[in-house]
Every structure is written in C-alpha cells, then in structure tokens.
Image (cartoon, helix red, strand yellow):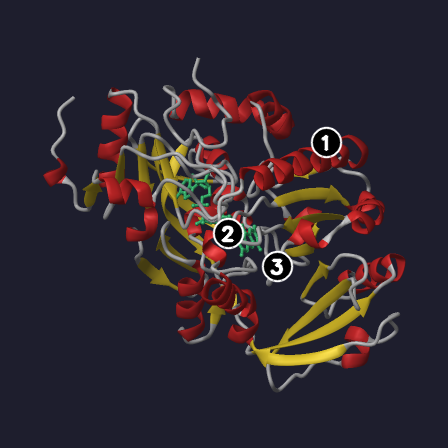
Amino acid sequence: MGFDPAELDGELLVDEASRQAYATDLGNITTNTPCAVLLPRSAQDVAAMIRFCRAHGISVSVRGRASTTFGQSLSDGLVIDSRTLDRVYSLGPGTAEVDAGVLWKDLITAAYEHSPRLTPPAITAYTSLSVGGTLSVGGLGGLVGALHTGLQGDHVRELEVVTGTGDIERCSADHRADLFEAVLGGLGQCGVITKAVLDLVPAKERARTYVLGYTDNAAFFRDLRTLIERPCIDHVYATLQPPGAESTHQLYATVLHDPAEPPDDAAAAGGLTATPAVEDSSYLDYVFTIDRFVDLMRDTAQWGGLAKPWYDVWLPGNAMEDYVTEVHPTLTERDLGPCGISLIYPQRRATMSRPHPARPEPDGSPWVYVLDINTTAESRTPDPEYVDEMLARNDRWFARARDHYGAVLYPIGAVRFTAEDWRAHFGDAWPALNEAKKRYDPDRILSPGPGIFPHG
Ligand SMILES: Cc1cc2nc3c(=O)[nH]c(=O)nc-3n(C[C@H](O)[C@H](O)[C@H](O)COP(=O)(O)OP(=O)(O)OC[C@H]3O[C@@H](n4cnc5c(N)ncnc54)[C@H](O)[C@@H]3O)c2cc1C
C-alpha cells in the first residue's frame, strides 16, 4: 500500500531525536522507541496512518500526555501524539465538543469563562491530562465528582473514534454502543478517540475545604465515612503518610458554593473526631491545586524524569479500612520517595455506569475506593535495582490485595500483568471487549503497551 506523507494535514516524524523523545512515559521505567511519530491535524490523518500500519503489520499507540507510568502508551511502531488534536468546537450550554488531545485544564478554563460559568462534572486531581487519555483509563474525579457524579467516562455523550481498520466512526450509548463501551476505559484497544462530546454543568465560584489530621486509623475512617454521607459535602479525598509523621492520615472535605450561600460549617464539619482547619479558595484555584504542586516538583525536583513505580488499586467499600489497617503500618519513606504521595479516593459505586474501568465485585457497600501509592525515585540516575525492587513490591502488594481484599487494578500505574491477568481483570466485561477487538482491530495493531491482546 503506497502512502505519501505530504497528503497528511499534520506531520510524520521519523528522525532519531523525535523518535527518542517518544520512547518513554512519565514512569521512566519502560522504553520502547517508535519507528515514527504522527502529529495529526485531523481524524483523516489518524485513519490514513492506521490503514497504512495495518497493511504493513505495524503497531500503533496513541498518547495524550503519556502520564500512565508503565509503557501503556508506548509502541515500537507508530506513536500518534494527540496534542495536535487540540480544538474546542463548541461549548455550552450542557455539553462541549472537543478534540481528544485537548487538556482538561484548558477545557475547564474555557468552560469557566463561559457565561453562565460551566464545568465538567468530574475532574481528575491533575488536569494537564488529555481528554482522550483519561477517558481511556476511566477518569476518576480526584478533585471534583466521585461522591455525587460518576467518572469522566460516565459523562460522555458521543465519541468520534478511528478504529484499527482505519474507519472513522461516531458512537454513543445508542449508536454503535459496542465501540463506545469498548473505548471508554478500554486503554486504546479498539480505537483512537479523536473527538468527544462531554457533559458540562453549572460551576460554583468558591470552594471551602475542611482539612483534618489523624494518627489513628480507626478515627480517620470513622470521620471519612461520616463525611462522604453528608449531603452538603461535594468532595472528599485523603492522603496517607508513613507511620511517624505528625499527621499520618489527612482528610480533605470540600463544599463548592457561591459567595451568596456560604457553607454551614457545623453541618459540613461538625461532630467529627478531629478539628478541621478551613481553607477557602476560588473554584479554579481549588481545581488546579495539584497542577501547582506538580509544576513545583517539575521545576525543583526534576519530577518529570524520576522513575515512578506507581501502585493504584480499587478496593471494595467494606474492605478498605481493613486493607489500609494492614498496609499503612508497613509503609516506609522509600515507598513514597521524596516527591511521592499516597491518596485515597471514595467513589459512589452507583454513579459508575460503563462496563470499564473494571472495579471490585459488589460487597453490599455503596462505596468503592481507589488507593494510590504514587512512589517516586530519589534521583534521575537510572537504577534498575530500585525499579526491580519496586515492581516486585507492587506485584506482592497487588496479589495480596486481590486475593484477600477483592482489589482490582486501576491500570494507570506499574503492576506487571500477563494476558491471562488482563482477561481475569476485565472479568464479565471480557467477552464484549474481546468481540469488539475482533471487530474493530482484527489485526491487533492498536495499543500493544499493556499486553492485553498479544500477537500469536
Ligand atoms: C499527577 C497525576 C494525577 C492524576 N490524577 C488522576 C485522577 O485524579 N484520576 C484519574 O482517573 N487519573 C489520574 N491520573 C492518571 C491519569 O488519568 C492517566 O494517567 C491518564 O491516562 C492520563 O492521561 P494522558 O493524556 O497522559 O494519557 P496517556 O498516558 O497518554 O494514555 C493513557 C492510555 O490511554 C491510551 N490513549 C491515550 N489517548 C487516547 C485516545 N485519544 N484514544 C484512545 N486511547 C488513548 C494510551 O494508549 C494509553 O493506553 C493522574 C496522573 C497524574 C500524573
């Protein structure tokens, strides 16, 4: 099959420096140098290159910002960098139509500037992530959502997808639902998302956050469970520090509000074990809290280049306290590293409507939790022994969490999975994903990184 790069709206890069620039991801653990990089300007570019790669048996991966940490977005064939798909086509009143390479922070800013002010209903903790990238993993509302809304994937009306056969399809819950469900939370296995129509909701102007510190696990969980059930609370997350820290467990509970209707502090944060500190901010300052933190680490600690053997799992609601009771006392400074962080996110199970991402079996609790132990290395100097040690730790942690607590991987981090592990991971959703793969990527060229559908 002949192909002329001059016919592309975008650019095809094949020089050594460009290819090397796409050889790893934020995790700095896995390397895989592509033979070419596409900076597409249209879905037609993506389709043309996928057809060419299919005809020549070349694998294709798409990357948003490569913020997954274990080679999920890498390929030795073609890497499609979605950052050049960066247009916002329409905004408001109830939806936005955007290219998949748009960063959430840019959509959030544009939606907030709209009159009346709007916002996505679920916002990840860090917002310099692409729309296509978070929709492909799930998109847990780390700073907005979680208690009352679903994941970002639950707030998609329609997608434009280029399949592994090079066809450009529109899909939704009502039209080509098999493709729609296979790509949301589907780690790029059945198609490249090129556009998304996303829900928007009215935005509040202010955020009041109650910050509570603990050294006692039981007291922490008592207050956590109380807070997530309080109707006036919009969001709750928590951080863990290794034993010995002044405050080993920290809770953050936020009420979003307009200035004319300030929160009732007693109703929001009264009657708890710990006494809260109160932090007031504008809505946007609140939403960009982690972005500021990450920017600081990038500037001062070369965070982007550090190895990040991250461990991220979903836990059933009834198992979470027992799991943290077991794991927390074993957590060391080395398990986090100088720029690492451990986070807990409660998510109301009933708000999650899509088959993916995989989550724990129902256990009678209305809640599921994500636990992140986002480890970073101390220095940029490559240290294979450190990486081996941390990957072995993650394997050990995950096997124990899965076998004894019913944990399920949130596949943004670095846990080694075989094709058999993936099949078990997807569980009841596997047959539909497998069928969609056969239909939309019959030659298995898309997204080899995680190893879900190996060749042969
Ligand atoms: C500091 C930080 C905070 C985070 N906080 C949260 C959080 O609160 N909630 C949460 O859910 N996650 C969080 N994450 C994880 C994040 O959502 C994932 O890493 C996400 O994949 C990042 O988006 P990305 O654009 O970098 O995707 P990439 O890492 O580039 O891609 C992720 C996967 O999706 C595939 N993919 C990418 N774009 C497309 C596309 N257009 N079509 C099809 N497949 C595609 C890739 O091939 C890869 O398999 C956080 C990450 C960081 C670094």
Q: Is residue 38 visible?
A: no
Mark 3 surroundings: few (<14), some (14-19) or many (≥20) residues within 10 A: some
Q: Which residue is mark 3?
A: 338
Query: Percent from the top left, x then y, of residue 192?
Result: 37, 38
Question: What distance separates the C-alpha of mark 3 from that of mark 1?
Answer: 26 Å
Task: Answer with left or right where residue 355 lies relative to residue 115.
Answer: right
Q: For mark 2, give the secondary structure.
A: loop
Q: Is residue 380 above or below residue 54?
A: below
Amino acid at pointer 3: Pro
Q: For mark 3, give the secondary structure.
A: loop
Position of the N terminus, as image quadrant, is top left
Amino acid at pointer 2: Leu
Q: Is residue 262 visible?
A: yes
Position of the C terminus, as image quadrant, is top left
Query: Percent from the top left, x then y, of residue 444?
Result: 40, 22
Q: Which residue is mark 2?
A: 306
Mark 1 surroundings: few (<14), some (14-19) or many (≥20) residues within 10 A: some
Task: Answer with left or right where residue 426 lies relative to residue 33.
Answer: right
Q: Quadrant of residue 353?
A: top right
Q: Nearer the viewer, residue 88 or 158?
A: 88
